[in-house]
């Protein structure tokens, strides 16, 4: 399948030529808004909500609440008449009911469909252990935003397939990998949306610069000490298999991988001719308009 990535100088605009599309498509990618909010329904989160709200507001351009930037981003989706808005996680800083409702109000105002996949903060309160039990406990609060299928979703749109996998614990399960295979086997152009980017040699330097640890999926370079401190287990075989599938001679009909998590903007090859795009964090007014043109 012919797929041509036309690199622009603008980190907020990606243009890709795709063979087999029925029509041009415009997508809005938003990630990592880190909105913190809570009310009396989550009393134990009240204090941390106030702290985190201020912390992220201090990092926004113009010192505005991250919620304002999130709402502006969704208004932009409507103004640009996008075909779909895709949110790749950490849109909220923890899953207090009041925070989830901010997302609900936002997506209710969208005129086109949306896809929401979870990040590692979406399901985790700072005072709880970061593990799969916590993740499963809070999945239900966000499941309705993720099509009641947070682990793996797909949307068919204009001859393309938008696939979203939740890899917010740095892992992909056998079932998710099977789901991805099935989508790719349709032969239609597939775009993959994840929270956590795949390790690539070109993404590693800016990530290490920012974070000092390699917070990418299937990344080498974790020390035992850093693994312990960050509760980071080794990659499961299915995670390694997914990384291999997407980085070693990636499937012919993979248009691109789009993700967030590392709070920077980046475009780099997964393998010759196939790209991964990382979108800047929403609380710094990051977003990416993805334009797909039929070839
Ligand atoms: Fe994240």
Image (tube, grey):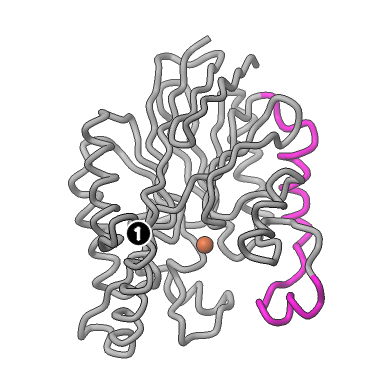
- Where is residue 286? Give x, y as percent: 41, 47
- Does the magenta segment cover residue 131? no
**Total numbered labels:** 1
Extreme front residue here? 62
Foreground of the two, 251 or 197: 197
Tell me which segment is drawn in magenta. Answer: 223-252
> Considering the image in quadrants, where does the N terminus appear?
top right
Name which residue lies at 71% across and 52% down.
205
- Where is residue 10? Give x, y as percent: 47, 31
Name which residue lies at 40% across and 69% down.
93
As displayed, is residue 180 above or below residue 186?
below
Q: Dot 1: within a 10 Å radius of its alpha carbon, few (fewer than 14), some, or many (20 or more) residues?
A: some
Extreme bottom residue here? 44
Name which residue lies at 28% across and 73% down.
37
As displayed, is residue 267 above or below residue 7?
below
Is label 1 within 8 A of ligand 1 (CB to nearest ligand atom)? no
As displayed, is residue 295 above or below residue 266?
above
Foreground of the two, 44 or 156: 44
Extreme top residue here? 295
Q: State which quadrant residue 41 falls in.
A: bottom left
- Where is residue 20? Give x, y as percent: 53, 14
Q: State which quadrant residue 234 falls in.
A: bottom right
Foreground of the two, 126 or 115: 126
Name which residue lies at 38% across and 27% down.
26
**Image side of residue 118 versus residue 233, left or right:** left
The residue wearing badge 1 is 60
- Where is residue 294? Give x, y as percent: 48, 13
């Amino acid at each position: 399948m012919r797929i041509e990535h036309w690199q622009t100088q603008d980190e907020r605009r990606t243009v890709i030529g795709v063979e087999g599309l029925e029509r041009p498509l415009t997508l809005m990618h938003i990630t990592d808004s880190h909105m913190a909010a809570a009310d009396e329904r989550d009393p134990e989160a009240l204090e941390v909500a106030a702290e985190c709200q201020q912390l992220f507001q201090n990092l926004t351009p113009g010192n505005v609440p991250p919620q304002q930037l999130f709402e502006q981003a969704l208004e932009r989706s409507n103004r640009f008449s996008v075909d779909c808005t895709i949110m790749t996680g950490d849109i909220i800083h923890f899953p207090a009911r009041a925070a989830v409702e901010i997302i609900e109000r936002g997506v209710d105002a969208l005129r086109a469909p949306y896809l929401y996949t979870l990040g590692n903060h979406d399901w985790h309160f700072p005072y709880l252990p970061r593990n799969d039990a916590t993740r499963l406990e809070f999945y239900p609060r966000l499941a309705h935003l993720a099509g009641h299928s947070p682990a793996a979703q797909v949307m068919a749109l204009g001859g393309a397939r938008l696939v979203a996998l939740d890899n917010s614990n740095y892992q992909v399960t056998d079932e998710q990998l099977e789901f991805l295979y099935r989508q790719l086997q349709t032969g239609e152009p597939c775009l993959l949306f994840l929270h956590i980017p795949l390790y690539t040699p070109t993404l590693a330097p800016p990530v290490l610069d920012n974070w000092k640890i390699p917070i990418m999926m299937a990344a080498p370079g974790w020390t035992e000490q850093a693994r312990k401190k960050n509760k980071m287990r080794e990659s499961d075989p299915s995670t390694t298999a997914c990384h291999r599938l997407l980085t070693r001679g990636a499937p012919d009909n993979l248009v691109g991988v789009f993700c967030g998590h590392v709070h920077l903007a980046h475009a780099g090859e997964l393998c010759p001719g196939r790209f991964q795009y990382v979108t800047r964090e929403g609380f710094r007014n990051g977003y990416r308009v993805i334009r797909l043109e039929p070839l």
